[in-house]
Amino acid sequence: MTDIDELVVRRPEGLYCAAGDFFIDPWRPVDRAVITHAHADHARGGHAHYLASAESHAVLLERLGDVSLQTLRWHERLRIGEVELSLHPAGHVLGAAQIRIGHPRLGTWVISGDYRLEADASCTPFEPVRCDVFVTESTFGLPVYRWPDASAEIERLRHWWAQNALAGHPSRLHAYSLGKAQRILAALGPPSGWPGPVVCHPAVERLNTAYRATGVALPETAAAAALSPADRRQALLIVPPSAAEGPVSRGFRSARDAVASGWMRIRGMRRRRGVDRGFIISDHADWPGLQTAIRASGASRVIVTHGYEAVMIRWLSEQGLQAGRFETSFGEAEAAGADS
Ligand SMILES: [Zn+2]
Ligand SMILES: [Zn+2]
């Protein structure tokens, strides 16, 4: 192994650490996969062995079925071949990890997966990890992407819902089933303060169950079948964007639609999605957040995986950092506006 000169390289299967003989979020089936988080573009089926954070255990098994999964607690160190590996919270969705890999000669790398700097009650908050090489996403790596205060956006959502309920229209919120939906649920607070019941699409409800099993306190939601027509007109329905027009929505006629996503920062995106409202709530770092995380890593070299790579690479170079990119298959969900 003495001929290795890079700790992590891109192979056709995915990002590969030869000194430990494992892949990180591989997009093709491999023997040993270390997984940053359970979103579909990072956690794929078909690998022989998985390693991920203990916090992601329930959501990963919900997504992948009964796979061979080893877990690590936050900061727990594991020796694999010539490297020492540990996992550190990325604050993106439940269990999302930054993967720290240390090697005596090749230095310390952090593969950050997707991350969000703004803390909330639905997952362990992001922690900066010092390293020589920081591998970063850049999903919202354009100066226009700056998030408003999330609690103010939640208040806007609550107001929209209350107005709809008063007018007798159900409210239908399009939110990604893993992470976004639970973050919003947790932020809505106790049901006694709601304008009506909350109903989640089954795809969302399955993940709510995994969150609760992990110890995240989410308020109780209602089953659509148990609601009277009057209750339905007051309800907030949370659906994955891809299932907005599915059978669950049929019992909620004349619903008003809204999207919760970082893409809603751009006015045209709301029109394109054909919804009444957009709430700017993202599980990714915004442009200043990306810069903060990069600086906090102390890395002199930064490699960009997915998102607005060219703009980010130019900014990195202007900061005097060594900048590069890995061409990956991450971000397909984000590009569709779903995983944001
Ligand atoms: Zn993600
Ligand atoms: Zn991603």
Image: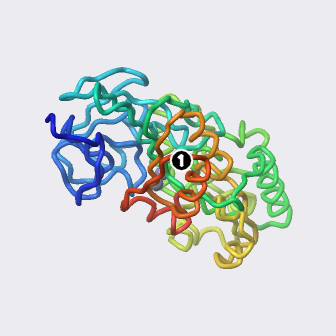
Query: Going by the image, does 318 lie left or right of 279?
Result: left
* Colour convention: rainbow
Instruction: Return the x and y of residue 83 as percentages of the image width and height.
Output: 26, 28
Question: In the rendered image, which residue does mark 1 sit on?
Answer: 179
In this view of the protein, which residue sits in the foreground, 84 or 119?
A: 84
Q: Is the distance from the Cβ of mark 1 to the nearest ligand 1 atom less than 8 Å? A: yes
Residue for point 49% across, 39% down: 300
User: Most extreme residue toward the front, as rendered?
Assistant: 320
Give the position of the C terminus as an image quadrant.
Answer: bottom right
Query: Going by the image, does 338 lie left or right of 173?
Result: left
Question: Height in image: 163 above or below 298?
Answer: below
Q: Looking at the image, can residue 110 be seen?
A: yes
**Total numbered badges shown on the rendered structure:** 1
Give the position of the N terminus as an image quadrant.
Answer: top left
User: Most extreme residue toward the top, as rendered?
Assistant: 76
- The residue under label 1 is which amino acid type? Gly
Instruction: Return the x and y of residue 165 as percentages of the image width and height.
Output: 80, 60
Instruction: Return the x and y of residue 41 as percentages of the image width and height.
Output: 39, 57
Query: Going by the image, does 172 lie left or right of 115?
Result: right
Label 1: few (<14), some (14–19) or many (≥20) C-alpha neighbours in 10 Å? many
Q: Looking at the image, can residue 67 be seen?
A: no
Residue for point 18% across, 39% down: 21
In this view of the protein, which residue sits in the foreground, 118 or 85?
A: 85
In this view of the protein, which residue sits in the foreground, 229 or 176?
A: 176
Residue for point 31% across, 30% down: 71
Instruction: Return the x and y of residue 124 as percentages of the image width and height.
Output: 55, 31
Query: Going by the image, does 205 lie left or right of 191?
Result: left
In this view of the protein, which residue sits in the foreground, 13 or 232?
A: 13
SS at circle 1:
loop
